[in-house]
Image: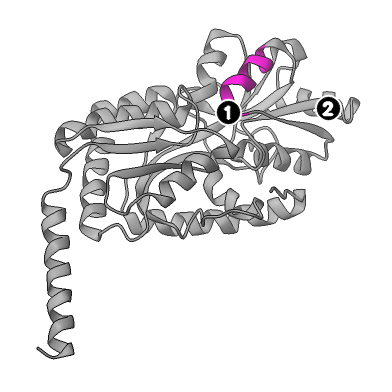
């Protein structure tokens, strides 16, 4: 047998093996890395979708929370996993920002993944401690200008969309705000309720319950239109910031080089879960909007997010090791 025939034989075997593997997929449980602590919006939404996808996939999706380093610990573990469809990673708005802010990453937050699909988009909500004594964005701006360098804003970590939203607000409003980063939203909420920090931009799913309970006060949402979950809250644009728009989002990734048929199967089940009326209602009640789409659409979106946040990262001089 000559070399050409031998290589052709290897190629045919590889292709047939991939097809058979995809046909039998999944044969055992699938791990899903959530790079943030349990109880955060990324975790809650992922569990809702995993529960719906499990029966149709025929295997359980097992959630593993791997927080730390602004989401990089869990994301890197997902990027380094075997490209066989048995390890997935949940992406948040922080992932493309990570590509811009970290100088010594040992993985590519975009290039080392194969997009499976978008999951949800969620408005951010500007919340404040009731102890601050402001009831509107205008009052907050006036208070911050009267107390330069004394008003603090919390975030779930340096370089997150919550952080950059605060930087964007400070830049547009001409304010001197002090950033206080936390390891996730939950500990930030505790200090925000206690009045240890003053304000925070956080996704509506995570911070909404505290606003409903009255332990935090909502001032505005960051989308162009009002949020269905909080119709009485104005938008930042209605509050005088015409160029202010930011959303939290969640998506599903597989390691790069995961076979296309497996990505397609995962996308099919993800889209089906997101399109189910009861799931859409459950997400909407939380303040999240189901955003099903094709893998290539999610890939294009990730690239656009890098371009969107790059000038803000550069202006705020956010550089991390």
Relative vertical location of residue 249 with respect to residue 317 in this rendering, above or below: above
How far from the left and from the top, in percent, is residue 146?
Answer: 90, 26
Magenta-drawn stretch contains 186: yes
Residue 179 or residue 19, whichever sits in front: 19
Residue 313 or residue 6, whichever sits in front: 6
How far from the left and from the top, in percent, is residue 309?
Answer: 62, 52
What residue lies at 16% left-to-right and 75% top-to-bottom?
Answer: 10
10 Å neighbourhood of mark 2: few (<14), some, or many (≥20)? many
Residue 25 or residue 173, whichever sits in front: 25
Query: In the image, which disc is placed on residue 144?
Result: 2
- Tell me the CA gap for discs 2 and 1: 25 Å
Q: Tell me: 37 left or right of 271.
A: right
On the image, which quarter does residue 306 sit in? Answer: bottom right
- The magenta-colored residue range is 183-193
Q: Secondary structure at mark 1?
A: loop
10 Å neighbourhood of mark 1: few (<14), some, or many (≥20)? many
Q: Which residue is mark 1?
A: 184
């Amino acid at each position: 047998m000559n070399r050409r025939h031998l290589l052709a034989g290897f190629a045919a075997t590889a292709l047939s093996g991939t097809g058979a593997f995809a046909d039998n997929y999944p044969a055992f449980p699938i791990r899903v890395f959530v790079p943030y602590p349990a109880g955060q919006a990324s975790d809650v939404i992922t569990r809702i979708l995993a529960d719906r996808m499990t029966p149709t996939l025929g295997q359980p999706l097992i959630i593993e929370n791997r927080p730390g380093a602004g989401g990089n610990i869990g994301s890197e573990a997902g990027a380094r996993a075997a490209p066989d469809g048995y390890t997935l990673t949940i992406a948040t708005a922080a992932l493309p920002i990570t590509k811009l802010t970290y100088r010594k990453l040992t993985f590519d937050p975009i290039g080392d993944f194969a997009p499976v699909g978008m999951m949800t988009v969620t408005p951010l909500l500007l919340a404040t401690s009731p102890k601050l004594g402001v009831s509107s964005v205008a009052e907050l701006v006036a208070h911050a200008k009267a107390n330069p360098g004394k008003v603090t804003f919390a975030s779930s970590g340096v370089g997150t969309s919550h952080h950059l939203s605060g930087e964007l607000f400070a830049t547009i409003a001409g304010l001197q705000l002090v950033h206080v980063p936390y390891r996730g939203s939950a500990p930030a909420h505790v200090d925000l309720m206690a009045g240890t920090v003053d304000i925070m931009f956080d996704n509506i799913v995570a911070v909404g319950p505290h606003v409903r309970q009255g332990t935090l006060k909502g001032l505005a949402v960051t989308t162009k239109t009002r949020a269905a979950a909080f119709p009485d809250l104005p938008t930042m644009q209605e509050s005088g910031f015409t160029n202010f728009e930011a959303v939290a989002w969640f998506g599903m990734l597989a390691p790069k080089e995961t076979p296309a048929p497996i990505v397609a199967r995962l996308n099919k089940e993800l889209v089906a879960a997101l399109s189910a009326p009861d799931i859409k209602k459950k997400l909407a009640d939380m303040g999240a909007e189901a955003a099903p789409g094709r893998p290539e659409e999610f890939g294009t979106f990730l690239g656009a997010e890098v371009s969107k946040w790059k000038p803000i990262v550069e202006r705020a001089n956010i550089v991390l090791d």
